[in-house]
Image: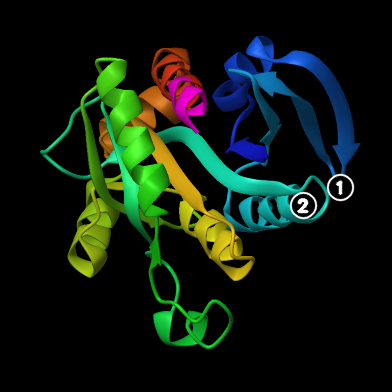
Amino acid sequence: MTIGIMGAMPAEVDQLCARLADVTREEYAGVVYHQGRLADKKVVVCCAGMGKANAASTTQVLITRYGAEKILFSGVAGNMTSRIGIGDVCVGRLVVYHDADADCIVQSAPFLEEFPGDPALVRCALDACAACGVKAIAGKIATGDRFVGDSATKAAIAAACHPDCVEMEGAAVAQIAARNGVPAVILRAMSDNADEEGYERLVVQDFSIDEYVTTATRIVEKMLQTL
């Protein structure tokens, strides 16, 4: 079994790539795919790039070219709930678009407005979080093609779809995985609160997300041990 592991930014996959054994690398359509073994599982790890188009195309490549039979997306997100805080994790029980017309999306395969995470992978992720001592929830993740870093946008998204966190890739990954009948799950460690302070820290100051990525990396590695 081959497991595809994705992130949107280099920092989100660099730690995983550093842990791979028997590594080969191939660049395809602008993305470098790292094939190797992690926790004695055959994996392909890649940085898709930010945004829905990059996430969708890379998911299809992982499935079609590299034979990925499960997809894990690991990265950071803006927190939208009081149930968790910075450094905690939201596992995607459900993933939705906050910037798309659901009536249009549902007209194409897999004919869904919302994309559920694979139940077995969601459970595996929650168990891995517990084993790592990380607070986690199975929640709702909202995806859109913009960084959310102001209170007005955050409030509008909250009113529209009531997510637990917001990011830029998850629903596209989940949609393409579902179209191909491949189980997938989205994991997000909270790096900010999707407001002005988060924008200042992550965008203006170019704040390092390594601390949060370390959390996500530990969880993915623990998941692989049980898959």
Residue 180 vertical position relative to residue 1 in the rendered view, above or below: below
62 on left or right of 161: right
Question: In this orientation, which residue lies closer to the viewer: 14 or 124?
Answer: 124
* 121 versus 157 height, above or below: above
> Hey, what amino acid is under mark 2?
Val
How far across and down, in percent of the image, does residue 54 sit? 67, 51
- The image's mark for residue 130 is none
For label 1, the residue is 29
Quadrant placement of the N terminus: top right
Q: Report the residue at 54% width, 65% height from top.
A: 178
Element on which disc 2 rests = helix
Per the image, label 1 sits on a secondary structure element best described as loop
Q: Position of residue 131 (x, y in %)?
A: 29, 18
Task: Work out whether residue 149 can be spotted.
Answer: no
Circles 1 and 2: CB distance less than 8 Å? yes
Q: Nearer the viewer, residue 30 or 118?
A: 118
Instruction: Tell me the magenta residue range.
Output: 222-227
Say if 60 sits above or below 199 in the image: below
Q: At 40% from the left edge and 54% from the top edge, which residue is drawn?
A: 117
The crowd level at tag 2 (other Cα within 10 Å; few <14, some 14-19, many 20+) is some
Residue at 10 percent of width and 39 percent of height: 82
- Residue 123 lies within the magenta run: no
Marks 1 and 2 sit apart, C-alpha to C-alpha, by 9 Å
Q: Is residue 137 above or below residue 67?
A: above
- Residue ID for mark 2: 61
Q: Quadrant of residue 32?
A: top right
Identify the main secondary structure in magenta: helix
